[in-house]
Amino acid sequence: MGVPRRRTAGALLLVLLVLVAAGACGPAAQGPPGPSPQAAGPPGALAYRIVEELSGDIGARVAGTPAERAAQATIVRELRDSGYAPVVQPFTRLHYKSGKTVSSANVVAVKPGSTTDEIVLGAHYDSVAAGAGALDNASGVGLALELARRLRGVATPCTVRFMFFGGEEAGLLGSQEVVETMSAGQRAATRVMIDLDSVAGGDELYVYGRPGDSWPRDALLTWARRLHVPLRASRLADELFAVDPRTIEASGFGAASDGSVFHLAGLPYAGIESAALDVGSGRDVGKLNTRREGRIWNTARDTLPHLERLYPGRVEAQLRALVLVLRAFLTGAAEQTTG
C-alpha cells in the first residue's frame, strides 16, 4: 500500500463542493470495517484479471446462455471474496429484436455508507456472439469488481449499490428490470447512476451525462484533473445517450447503454466509455472506439489478445486510471493510495 497524500485546504474545500453537488450524502462515518477482502493488488490489476477471465476463459456471453451464467457465477464469487453478500435477481423479458424470451439475472451487492443516499455503479456482463466481449463489457465488469473490493470496509459518504446487469445486448433488459421495479423511495435515494460500459481499449477516456444535470460528469472530471487522468467530456455523447433507445434503429442517431434507462426514468447518471468520439459520420458518429480500426465493440476484434497486440498496455493503463478516479469520487477523499 502506498502512503496517502497530504490533505491541503484546497483539497478539503474541493471535497465539500463535490459532496454538496452529489446531494450532500454527509461526512464519511468511521464505522468498523467489514470482513477483510483479499488484496486487490496495484490499481487496475484485479480489473484486468477479470477481463482475462470473462473474455478469455469464458468468451462470448450471449444473454440467456450458459456462458452468461458462467460470467454471473464469476461475479458472485468475486463479490463474496471481497466480503459482500451478493443477491442474484433472475428475470425473464423479451429480446428487443427477435421477440423471444430471454432468461437472465442481475447481480447486486451493497456497500453501506454513512447515509442511505445511494450511488449506483452499474456494468453489464453479457456480450454479443461476435468476439469475446473484452472491451464490451468485461472491462466495465472488472472495473466495478475492483472498486467493490477496494471500497469494502472503507468509509463512503453515500451507500454504493453495485449492479451487474444481464441481457444488456438483448435490449437493456437487466437495467429495465431494475428501473421498472424501483420503489418511489429507491428512486428518491438514488443520487446518480454511473454506467461503466466499454471503459478500456478505445483511444480516449470519455465521461458523459444527462443534459442539463451535469454535476456527476463535472465531479468526475474534477477528480480526473487532480489525479492527472486524461478523462474528457463529450457533448456529443451527452446527446447520443439522451435519445430514447427505441428510436435509434429508425433514425440512425443515438446510442444506448444501461445508463440510458436511468436517464429516461428521470434519474441523474454519468457514463464512462473508451472511444474515438471525434471521428466517424452518419450512423457511425460517436460509435467508434479507435481511429485505427473504427468499431471494436460488437465485432470479432473485441478480444483481449487483439487489443494487446495493437494497443499494448492500453487496457490495463485505462483501468488503473479509472480505479483512481472513481475511488476518489465514491469516497469523497482527496488522498489516493498506490496499492
Image (cartoon, rainbow, N blue to C red):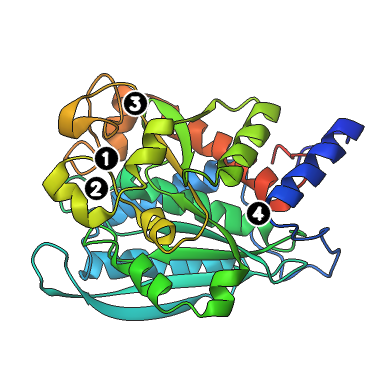
Figure quadrant of the C terminus: top right
Give the mark nearer the N terminus: 3 vs 1. Answer: 3
Residue 10: image location, x then y, percent: 86, 31
* 334 or 17: nearer the viewer: 17
Pointer 2 with pointer 1, Cβ within 8 A = yes
The N terminus: image quadrant: top right
Q: Closer to the observer: label 3 or label 2?
A: 3
Residue that label 3 marks: 276
Q: CA distance from mark 4 to mark 1?
A: 26 Å
3D distance between C-alphas at marks 3 and 2 = 21 Å
Q: How far separated are the C-alphas under marks 3 and 4? A: 29 Å
Label 2 packing within 10 angstroms: few (<14), some (14-19), many (20+):
many
- Residue type marked 1: Thr
Give above or below for 168 relative to 198. below
Q: Secondary structure at mark 2?
A: loop
Instruction: Tell me the element at label 1.
Output: loop
Labels 3 & 4 near each other (Cβ < 8 A): no
Q: Amino acid at mark 4?
A: Arg
At horizontal 67% and vertical 35% (from top left) the residue drawn is: 223
Q: Earlier in the sequence, mark 4 or mark 2?
A: 2
Q: Earlier in the sequence, mark 4 or mark 1?
A: 4
Q: Reading the chain from its start, which is encountered first: label 3 or label 4?
A: 4
Identified at 34% across, 22% down, the residue is 278
Q: Earlier in the sequence, mark 3 or mark 2?
A: 2
Residue furthest out toward the left: 98
> What residue sits right under mark 4 in the picture?
150
Nearer the observer, 294 or 97? 97
**Residue at image mark 1:** 303
- Name the residue that disc number 2 marks: 132
Query: Which dot marks residue 254?
Result: none
